[in-house]
Amino acid sequence: MSPSANLLTGKGYDFGTQGAHNIAKGGTHPHLIPQYNDQFQERKWRLEHAAGAFRVFARLGYSEGEAGHISIRDPVDPSTFFINPLGLHFAMIEAKDMVHVDEKGTILPDGNQAPINAAGFAIHSALQKARPDINAACHTHSVYGKAYSTFGRPLEMINQDACIFYNNQAVFKNFGGVAIEGDEGREIAEAAAGARTVILQNHGLLTMGSTVDEAAYLFTLMEKSCQVQLLANANVKEEKIIIPDDVAAYSAFVTNDPETMYASFQPEFGYQRRLDKDEFMWKEDKIEEK
Ligand SMILES: [Zn+2]
């Protein structure tokens, strides 16, 4: 939580403090980010939530061939990260399937021994290096993100939900073909600056978060916001009303902090656990712990 900004909107709303308490009344929020003393336990938790995010992405139709990746920073060795194996459908990924890789691309022995997507490695390794404030990144070739990316423009503040992207989105315009090489990843990280969401022009969406849940929630919301923007843009007869800056800033302030973003993904994550009967969660007998 950050200290009160002591700012008021045009309607007199006090910015107050950030956090999930803003959306909980009558009790503590049921989905606060767990804290771990044991980094190996935290690793398992991150892997389970990454696997859950893949299952949600599959259910929402974000898969496209072998494209798409989610990476999570390893809390045990933060210079390394886990990413999905090449060629395994999002709907089949389990926590133990994630591949542990170092910054040179070496597949480390304590994760799944499988090749990874070269472009995915290039993008995620550059991001994980450039952004110590983030622990996870998501990128897929989802339909509406891909469609809206052709304009090379940020989302407009045309509804309350879109305000989460107020001062929190960037457009990467320099599409140079499939990002097999590391340079494109570094350029994307530079284009993002401090933002946690990036529209990759002529490509798709990329989101980041201090938890994979935050990155995944931002992804689902950005994809849906691209759909809404395309629908609104399709009505050329009427002028769109854009939310004023002070209102957009207030809405962003009370909703786009890491705690609230984490909480916002838990309904999808919990539903996925129910649907999949926890199939994607960690199973002790499936991997040797180092
Ligand atoms: Zn891609």
Image (cartoon, grey):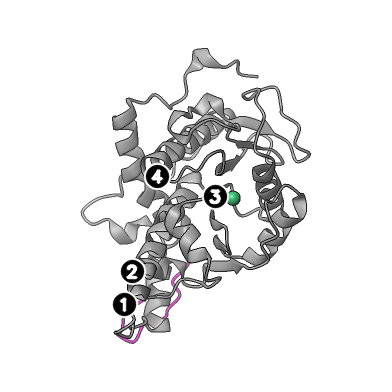
- Say which quarter of the image contains residue 133: bottom right
Residue ID at (46%, 48%): 216
On screen, residue 254 above or below 122: below
Q: Earlier in the sequence, mark 2 or mark 3?
A: 3
Q: SS at mark 2?
A: helix
On screen, residue 243 above or below 175: below
| Mark 2 or mark 3, whichever is nearer to me | 2
Report the Cα–Cα distance between label 4 and label 3. 13 Å
Disc 2 designates what residue?
Answer: 231
Residue ID at (63%, 25%): 111
Which quadrant, please, contains the C terminus?
top right
On screen, residue 66 above or below 245: above
Disc 1 designates what residue?
Answer: 235
Disc 3 designates what residue?
Answer: 139
Q: Is residue 49 left or right of residue 68?
A: left
Q: Is residue 43 left or right of residue 124?
A: left
Disc 4 designates what residue?
Answer: 61
Report the Cα–Cα distance between label 3 and label 1. 29 Å
Residue type beneath disc 2: Leu
Residue ID at (53%, 66%): 150
Residue type beneath disc 4: Gly
Residue type beneath disc 3: His
| Circle 3 residues within 10 Å: few <14, some 14–19, many ≥20 | many
Is ligand 1 closer than 8 angstroms to the Cβ of mark 3? Answer: yes
Residue type beneath disc 1: Asn
Q: SS at mark 4?
A: loop
Task: State yes or no: discs 1 and 4 in contact (Cβ < 8 Å).
Answer: no
Q: SS at mark 3?
A: strand
The boundaries of the magenta stretch are 1-16
| Mark 3 or mark 1, whichever is nearer to me | 1
